[in-house]
Amino acid sequence: MRDLAHTSVPSWAFGADVMTSPDVAGTAHILVGVGPDAAPVLDRWSEELTGELTRVEAPDPAMAAAQLREELAIARVGVRVRITGATGACLALRGIATSAGVEDDELYVAPTGIGPIDFYCVHCGAVTSTEACVDDVVPCAACAKQLVVYHHVSRRSGRFLGFQVDAEEAHDLP
């Protein structure tokens, strides 16, 4: 794996536990969990926090995303968001929260495992879900080009960038 000193991928997505302690001073907290491994984390957070708590539990990222959007639409100043689940789900939900205006210091993410990630194909615009890691080569689900999962993650979508692995090599044109 390449040196990731200059990457948009959050360190917690690599398994590094370097996030600062979560903010417990918020006036309200939205706790979001995806998958069965999230329940114990949500239980722990629910016990340690005071104030208004909203708990969102979903079996998949799409359902959690819809519920998170609803909660953020009615949220007031002082809300804090905590997200747990597989890394790919956490990245997607982080994108929803930051797109809604949640600042990094109002957001805490604690992945429960690796799980699938989404990557965006720069050649056809399709999104592919995969169990790959950064620098892996994976076929695009739409155009079938062999794509490198690049060390860039969109803050808005939570998707990695994918580009053709041999794009710089000469190809025979028809």
Image: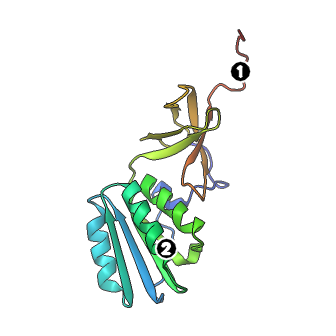
Q: Disc 2 or 1, which lies upstream in sequence?
A: 2
Q: Find numbered disc 2 in the image and state the secondary structure of the residue it sits on.
A: helix
Q: Which quadrant would the C terminus be assigned to in this image?
A: top right
The image shows residue 83 at horizontal and vertical percentages of: 42, 68
Going by the numbered disc 2, the residue's amino acid type is Leu
Above/below status of 57 relative to 146 = below
Q: Out of 121 and 114, give the one closest to the viewer.
A: 121
Q: In this orientation, does residue 134 appear?
A: no
Asked whether disc 2 touches disc 1, contact meaning CB atoms under 8 Å apart, the reply is no
Q: Which mark is residue 88?
A: none
Above/below status of 111 relative to 70 = above
Q: Is residue 170 left or right of residue 86?
A: right
**Occupied quadrant, residue 146:** top right
At a point 42% along the width and 76% down the height, the residue shown is 30
Q: Residues within 10 Å of mark 2 (few under 14, many from 20)?
A: some
Going by the numbered disc 1, the residue's amino acid type is Glu
Q: Find numbered disc 1 in the image and state the secondary structure of the residue it sits on.
A: loop
The image shows residue 78 at horizontal and vertical percentages of: 52, 86
| Mark 2, residue position | 72
Q: Which quadrant would the N terminus be assigned to in this image?
A: top right
| Mark 1, residue position | 169
Q: Out of 18 and 35, give the one closest to the viewer.
A: 35
Q: Out of 43 and 7, give the one closest to the viewer.
A: 43
Number of callouts: 2
Which tag is nearer the camera, tag 2 or tag 1?
2
At a point 29% along the width and 84% down the height, the residue shown is 47
Q: In this orientation, does residue 108 appear?
A: yes
The image shows residue 89 at horizontal and vertical percentages of: 43, 56
Q: Out of 93 and 85, give the one closest to the viewer.
A: 93
**Colour scheme shown:** rainbow
Above/below status of 114 relative to 147 = below
**Occupied quadrant, residue 147:** top right
